[in-house]
Amino acid sequence: MKLLTIAIPCYNSQEYMSHAIESLLPGGEDVEILIVNDGSKDNTAKIADEYAAKYPTIVRAIHQENGGHGEAVNTGLRNATGLYYKVVDSDDWVQEEALHKILDVLREMVENAQSLDMLIANYVYEKPSVNKQKVIDYRTAMPQNRVFGWSDIMHFKTSQNILMHSVIYRTKLLKDCGLELPKHTFYVDNIFVYQPLPFVKTMYYLNVDFYRYFIGRDDQSVNEKVMIGRIDQQIKITKIMIEAHDLDKLKEKKLRNYMAKYLAMMMTVSSVFLIKEGSEESLAKKEELWEFLKKSNKQLYKAVKRCVLGRSMQLKGKAGNKIIVLGYQLSRKIYGFG
């Protein structure tokens, strides 16, 4: 059995997928690389098959009809044989030394029969167009180099959300919690991280700059104009996350608080882009989203409003909307992706 399965969802990725694959090959026989070709129309399938033929014990090419990023992640999980599961997008890559250190930790956990549900490592915003990098680490939020639980976590800054880039889950945990991402929908990476959290009991934070997150493609899902155009999908994902768990039933207080802060981030992102779009329809959608949260769970609604991001969203009128947008623009510059 492989130690780590890494799924690479690919759609028309011929120009950059090789960089992602090559960055993972140094993992050797400890890794299983699943290249999931999501109905591509370019040479993605050919490149995937070539890698599978060249590295038959490491790489598998899986071809499917187009189902979107979420279905590619689902397919990877269904086919995973590794004890742990990681997703690397086809335009991103990983740092070799950090990969080896992560494999060392996972191997040690297995050899010592130590239960580990989630491993977290740093990720780096890479913006080559302006020669800019920004490391997101968790040094002030989590203990380092040991197994810990939710009661051990510390304060998470706004920039320190656990994202798909930073997380490696135990494969069986993802399957047991019934994770199934929606098809043909963007921003499903938030569900991938959020839904399994209540099932996580043991974690390990390794302070290495592992995942390199490329910023700069015009068609990228985090491009601001693209996000505004896809705001209905962002709202859909946020509503799915609101309904995923009743946070009141979670025993771990720090887990409840963290998940409420995560939802506050999602509510903020949706609200900001609806405000930036600016039409009466979009502003009405913003109010409807907050009303949806309130009707779904009044206690959760209050908890989200109490978070710093949640409080900022309560500013009213045109002046309030301007302050919200200015705050968002400032945060983009501070956190390195503006």
Image (cartoon, rainbow, N blue to C red):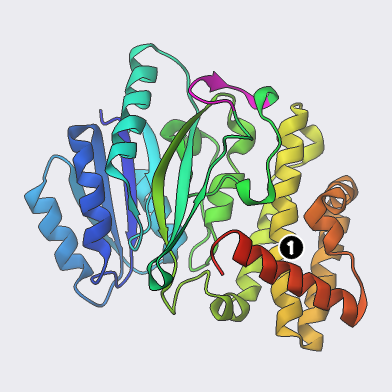
Q: Quadrant of the C terminus?
A: bottom right
Q: Position of residue 74 (x, y in %)?
A: 42, 51
Confirm whether the magenta stretch covers residue 45. no
Residue name at image x 32 percent, y 45 percent: 6
Question: Which residue is more in the foreground, 246 or 278?
Answer: 278
Residue name at image x 89 percent, y 45 percent: 299
Quarter of the figure with residue 283: bottom right
Q: Position of residue 292 (x, y in %)?
A: 82, 62
SS assignment at label 1: helix
Confirm whether the magenta stretch covers residue 149. yes
Q: Residue furthest front?
A: 131
Q: Amino acid at mark 1?
A: Thr
Q: Is residue 319 left or right of residue 21?
A: right
Quarter of the figure with residue 289: bottom right
Image: magenta residue range: 143-150
- In the rendered view, would you say 241 is above or below 151? below
Q: Is residue 81 visible?
A: no
Quarter of the figure with residue 257: top right
Q: Is residue 321 left or right of residue 244?
A: right
Q: Position of residue 252 (x, y in %)?
A: 74, 27
Q: Is residue 25 visible?
A: yes
Residue name at image x 20 percent, y 66 percent: 45
Question: Which residue is more in the foreground, 193 or 296?
Answer: 193
Q: Dominant secondary structure of the magenta stretch?
A: loop
Q: Position of residue 234 (x, y in %)?
A: 63, 67
Q: Residue furthest bottom?
A: 279
Q: Which residue is tagged 1?
A: 268
> Badge 1: how crowded within 10 Å, few (<14), some, or many (20+)?
many
Residue name at image x 73 percent, y 71 percent: 272
